[in-house]
Every structure is written in C-alpha cells, then in structure tokens.
Image (tube, rainbow, N blue to C red):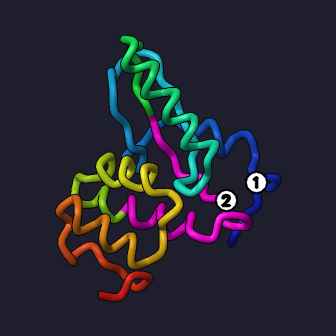
Amino acid sequence: MNRTMTDMRAADLTAPLDARDHTRGASGGPQLVLYGDFECPYTAAAMRAIDVLVARGATFELVFRYFPLREIRPHAQAAAEAAEAAARQGRFWEMHDVLFRNQLRLEAADLRRYAERIGLGTSWIGPRWPG
C-alpha cells in the first residue's frame, strides 16, 4: 500500500533505531535522524549541511531512513532500492554518496553503473534492474 506524506503518522517518524537503519558517526551520543529521498534537492542540501557540521567537528550519529517521494520523484523508489541492495553488501554509505552526487541521473542504467563503480558486481541486480 502506497501512502502519501499526509498519511504518515507521527509514530511512523519516531520509531526507535533497529537493524534496518543505516548509521554512521559517533554512536552513544546525540542522533540526527534524516528521512530522505535520493532524488530530492532538499535532502541533498540537508546532507551537505550535515557534512559541514561534521567537518567542523560536530559529533553525532547520523541515521538515514528512506522517505521516497514517489508521487513527485519518479526515480526515488528505485534509488532507495539500489541503496538497500548496496547495504546488503555492506556498501550503503558508498551508494548513498554516489546517488546524491548524481541525483539528476538515476535511471536504471545509471544505478547499474553506480553499483559497478562501487564494486558491487552484478549479484545485487534485482527485477527492477535486469542485467
């Protein structure tokens, strides 16, 4: 069932961390939870701001959760699925960074190319990205 942003309840956005979350940074301290869309320019701007904070010495644990805006971003879901496929091989943050650097190029062929670039090979390819 696809839900729109207005269908989301506050409880959906305050779920405790679990094994599905992607984290980096200093664990055990403050957490910054970012609900993001790889195709969204505002999410990309937020990531740039987070990178500036880290470069200035801020210490926190970054938690990235998918929030693909399917209704307005045609490649958001596929990009999230590609990132999750990369995560299964321990390469989430590498794919995350590549997707944000190339967020205007998120067609299936682009996603395959990015997977190869970060060393995923072809084992990650699912039905959305036929080999």
Q: How many badges with numbers are in the image?
A: 2
The quadrant of the picture occupied by the C terminus is bottom left
- Marks 2 & 1, CB-CB < 8 Å contact: yes
Label 2: few (<14), some (14–19) or many (≥20) C-alpha neighbours in 10 Å: some
- Residue 110 horizontal/vertical position (percent): 39, 71
Rendered residue at 31%/78% (across/down): 125
Residue 96, placed above or below residue 115: above
Q: Quadrant of residue 114?
A: bottom left
Q: Judge whether residue 6 is colored magenta.
A: no
Q: Which residues are magenta?
A: 63-84
Frontmost residue, 64 versus 3: 64
- Residue 46 horizontal/vertical position (percent): 57, 34
Frontmost residue, 88 versus 73: 73
Asked if residue 2 lies left or right of residue 129, the reply is right
Q: Amino acid at mark 2?
A: Leu
Rendered residue at 72%/64% (across/down): 72
Q: Judge whether residue 68 is colored magenta.
A: yes
Hey, which residue is sitting farthest top in the picture?
57
What label does residue 5 carry, if any? 1
- Residue 3 horizontal/vertical position (percent): 73, 63
Residue 108, placed above or below residue 57: below
What label does residue 16 carry, if any? none
What label does residue 69 carry, if any? 2
- Residue 36 horizontal/vertical position (percent): 57, 47
Secondary element at image label 1: helix
Asked if residue 53 lies left or right of residue 23, the reply is right
Point out the tag, 2 or 1, that comes first from the N-terminus.
Answer: 1
Q: Quadrant of residue 82?
A: bottom left
Asked if residue 97 lies left or right of residue 46, the reply is left
Rendered residue at 47%/64% (across/down): 79
Q: Amino acid at mark 1?
A: Met
